[in-house]
Image (cartoon, rainbow, N blue to C red):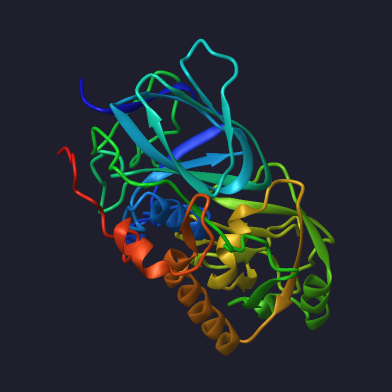
Amino acid sequence: MSAALRILAPGLLTTVQDLGRPGYQSLGIPVSGGLDPVSLRAANALVGNNQDAGALEVAYVGPTIAVEADDVRLSFVGAQAAIDILPDAAATTGERIATMRSIRVRRGEVIRIGSLSGGAVLYVAVEGGFDIPPVLGSVSTYLRGGFGGWQGRALVAGDRLPLRRSAASARDECRIEGLDLRAPARVRAIAGPQKDYFSENEIASFFAGQYTVCAGSDRMGMRLQGRRVDHARGYNITSDGIAAGSIQVPGNGQPIILLADRQTTGGYPKIATVISADLPALGRLPMGATIAFEQVTVEAAQALRRDLFAEIERIGEKIVPIGHAATDMAPMLLDHNLISGVVDAHNWTL
């Protein structure tokens, strides 16, 4: 039997995601991909995958997973969670491990991930990745369209996700230290394309206000509750393109931030757009979190984007063997295939 991870319990919403499928929005196909691409990249780096490999995105409550392979190497990056490695499916207690690390799990053992805290999503990467055919170049799940990922849907009990490796490579386990996943004090945004649909006072009040992430938020959009934003010219426009982070204001005056599974066009005025550098942190925010905005210039947004990608390039420098300090990193990174997404091909199965 081929190597796989079997889903014993799916959690609240567990899907396969990578960095998305850009280039098809003109056809009405969203980009999708991980809500928090920084944590996704870090999880892949911990197990030696390319940063754009598919991983499990776990939302709010985690799954229970049985290993059906000689052994597998997994990593966990994102929100905090109680993660237990159980000796078998009948066991109720086992070894409790932390996030931000990799671990080798053997055949028959079970990974149980509890409720998340401090964030909305956690990423579980597996060394070698999943043996899932891409759709339009990506294994990301687009739930509303019913394609990508595993059968175009969230995972359910009984799913058996095939793996590209039958066994983990022989190396020490690693952890990541110094990866800052905190949200900024104020989410930065540039003026929206329909700012003229709002008075200057309403725009100023929007940026001065505070909002709560409320129920109804999902991978498509984050619904906010707070001071009503009034329109100066009505709330219907000719539908136009939607960028990641667009903040549209429908007729009820409560803003919606459009996320990974956003529609490609929309007909509500957009008061602002969250800058790309703050989108990963935004994707981590759980329901009930408070959020405030700060207006920045396009030039500042571009500089912050460059800073984000420079930080992403340094993820490998933050990975150290468990039990070791982050000192001379280069030899360790070379020994453990953690530079530039190089993957050890030992025991690779096609």
Residue name at image x 83 percent, y 68 percent: 209
Residue name at image x 79 percent, y 67 percent: 230
Say above or below: 112 vs 140. Answer: above
Does the rendering let one see residue 230? yes
Give how far across and how far down residue 299 sits, in percent: 56, 89
Residue name at image x 62 percent, y 60 percent: 181
Quarter of the rendering occupied by the C terminus:
top left
Foreground of the two, 314 or 26: 314
Q: Residue furthest bottom?
A: 299
Give how far across and how far down residue 39 sits, in percent: 51, 55
Does the rendering let one see residue 23? no
Residue name at image x 26 percent, y 54 percent: 343
Quarter of the rendering occupied by the N terminus:
top left
Give how far across and how far down residue 143 sits, in percent: 44, 40
Q: How many marks?
A: 0
Say above or below: 140 vs 116. Answer: below
Q: Residue furthest left?
A: 350
Give how far across and how far down residue 166 sits, in percent: 23, 32
Foreground of the two, 62 or 146: 62
